[in-house]
Image (cartoon, rainbow, N blue to C red):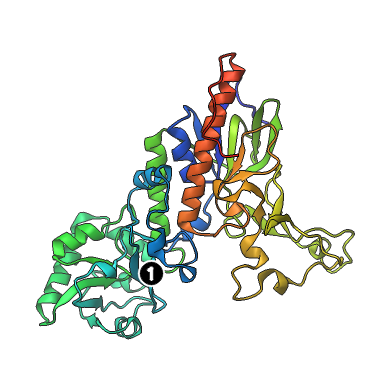
Amino acid sequence: MKESPAGATRHVIVIGSGVAGTAAGVAAATIAPSVIVLAGGTGASSLATGAIDHAFWQDHHPAAHGNALSERAKAVLNALGGYAVPATGCTVVTLGGLVRRADGRDASLLDVARLNGDGVAVVECNRPGWNASELAFSWGKGYRALEAGLLRHTDESLLPDVDLAARHDDASRLGWLAERLREALARTEARWGGIVLPPILGLERACADALSERVGLPCGEAVGSPGGPAGLRFERARDRALSSAGVVKVAGRASTVEAHGETWRVIAEDGQVLDAYAVVVATGGLIGGGMEYAPSEAILATALPSHVSPPIRLTLKAPLMLGARGRPLDTPGSLFGFAPESLARPFSRDALVETVGALAQTPDAGVPVGGSPPGLFAAGDIVADTPRTWLGALAQGAQAGTSAAHVALSRAETASGAKAAPVSAIPL
């Protein structure tokens, strides 16, 4: 093992670098002097499509949640940049043909609720998955196709969205695009309130505002597919925010989190050992990689299993109890486990795979049960019974990072022999 040098106990270690982990790291760094984020690779946050919500979008009216973010969560959002969460929510259009409400959006998406009521131009573009006429028809009255030459090179009809978006990071290419759009608008007599384009407006940063200024009309993307530019824009924003906050990002996947005397020890898969006064586990859920489907009947392939176990487990060893609906996971009554369809219950958002996670004393605060000594927190999709949403993960991460930093400071002062300050901000 590569042990931490003597005296190298950090204040806070955050395991995971998605939305929850980033929020935890940035929030903790405003309080604690030394914060590390252990980044284990791409997770669910990199699959974000640009529309961001507090709860599943069909289950609530987004405008009711416009002011739901805490001040610490708003501070993290500002640190990330490139996102808008208006008090009244927003309205976006999707490649699936829907017009839907959202609590917020990636700044490259077009908020059609803010347009002046004139028609919305849907730009014709020979791109996979983009048919302007069909999309305009699906989105409804007021949307009309607009002929405009957006492709400059022959390969751009086949390039993935992320590659074409990266080309628009170049200011001269963005200027070329603005010129094509102005020419297309000049050829029509229609009145336009805005222009919607494929998800191609920048990778390093959202560039819809710069394009809108050059064109003279609001321009923006439709909500894309998972794995598109919106997810990679988050990664760029994350790296900038962590760097600005003074957070050290270390590549590696944690294999073990364990109590080590009066501190916590994190052991990475490569043998690296990190010690801290507090740890935030933000490894994601089944999609992000923090949990895995591991039914007992898979132990020996087609042979009869030697024992039975719950069908879902953590991918790292940690004193966290998995459960759902406020109780620990059930153990199957048969050596052949549960029927898989009973775990997913197609088209049901309260199925086990949607709710399972680490049981927490206060799910919204991301404080796990069984953390002894104190200082172990969880946030994001790893927490049971919380919505798997972008803004939900941000809020939980900011809360967990803040609480972890307060605990860390208190324990560091105690370890150094100084009088510990009261930790009234820690949710119990």
Q: Quadrant of the C terminus?
A: top right
Q: Is residue 95 depicted above or below 287 in this figure?
A: below
Of 16 and 4, nearer the camera is: 16
The answer to whether residue 146 shows anywhere in this view is yes
- Check the image and report above or below for 106 versus 302: above
Residue 150 location (% of width, % of height) = 23, 71
Image-based side of 90 in relation to 405, left or right: left
Q: Where is residue 414? Give x, y as percent.
A: 60, 19
Picture quadrant of residue 5: top right
Residue in view at x 22 percent, y 70 percent: 115
Judge by depth and name the residue closer to the eye, 148 or 11. 11
Q: Quadrant of the N terminus?
A: top right
Q: Is residue 18 visible?
A: no
Q: Which residue is nearer to you in this view: 281 or 152?
A: 281
The residue lying furthest to the top in this view is 417
Q: Position of residue 375 (x, y in %)?
A: 62, 34
Residue 246, x across and y down, in percent: 41, 33
Circle 1 SS class = strand
Q: Where does label 1 land, which residue? A: 101
